[in-house]
Image (spheres, rainbow, N blue to C red):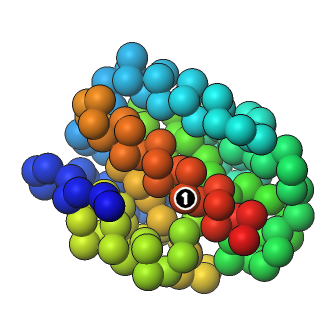
Amino acid sequence: MTLPRRGSTPTTSTEGPHRQIDQLAPPELWGRLVAAVFALPEVVEGHSQVSPASSRAVFLTDRQVESSPERSLAPGKRLEPVHLHGVDDTSVHLVLPEDRGRELIDLGWAEPHGYADFGTEFMVYGPRDEDELATVVGIVEESLAFARG
């Protein structure tokens, strides 16, 4: 069960690229988020196919092709269910089932991706502390499971 995120939601951009502007993860915590995500089983880091160069794509080693386009941030290309934005942003773009994404929005953890095509694309805000780090990594794991579908 995901608990509500404390405080107000961060400010995010209204024009591309879709990014988080305030309430960023501290640099050390952001680095730990990156390390934790790439320590997950059967993932590998790569260059995002759809996000600025400072972003890190999360690719699956056990699946390279999407089972359906709504399970990837880069439909029709290599399966990219998640990418982590750089230290100047610290948010995470990922795919989730629509109902789970709406739940995370209601709990204050996420918002719809600014350029969503399928309603499964979301921005999850960067973690501000240890508890939030664990929650965000857990949400990334949910996204990877959804992508494997």
Report the quarter where the N terminus lies. Answer: bottom left
Q: Label 1's element?
A: helix
x%, y% of residue 30?
A: 43, 27
Q: Is residue 145 left or right of residue 99?
A: right
Q: Position of residue 139 (x, y in %)?
A: 47, 54
Is residue 118 visible in the rendered structure shown here?
yes
Instruction: Give the residue at x 56% y 51%.
Output: 141
Residue 110 sits in quarter:
bottom left
User: Which residue bears the numbered disc 1?
Assistant: 142
In the image as oriented, which residue stretches furthest toward the front?
A: 1
Let me know if residue 94 appears in the view: no
**Residue 62 location in percent, x, y?**
86, 50
User: Is residue 74 shown left or right of residue 99?
Assistant: right
Give the farthest residue toward the top.
28
Q: Give the total of numbered labels.
A: 1
Residue 60, horizontal then vertical, whole percent = 79, 48
Q: Is residue 149 above or below residue 6?
A: below
Going 14% across and 50% down the picture, which residue do you hit?
6
Q: Residues within 10 Å of mark 1 (few under 14, many from 20)?
A: some
Q: Name above or below for residue 109 compared with residue 121.
A: above
Q: Amino acid at mark 1?
A: Glu
**Residue at position x 57%, y 25% from top?**
35
The residue at 71%/38% (across/down) is 41
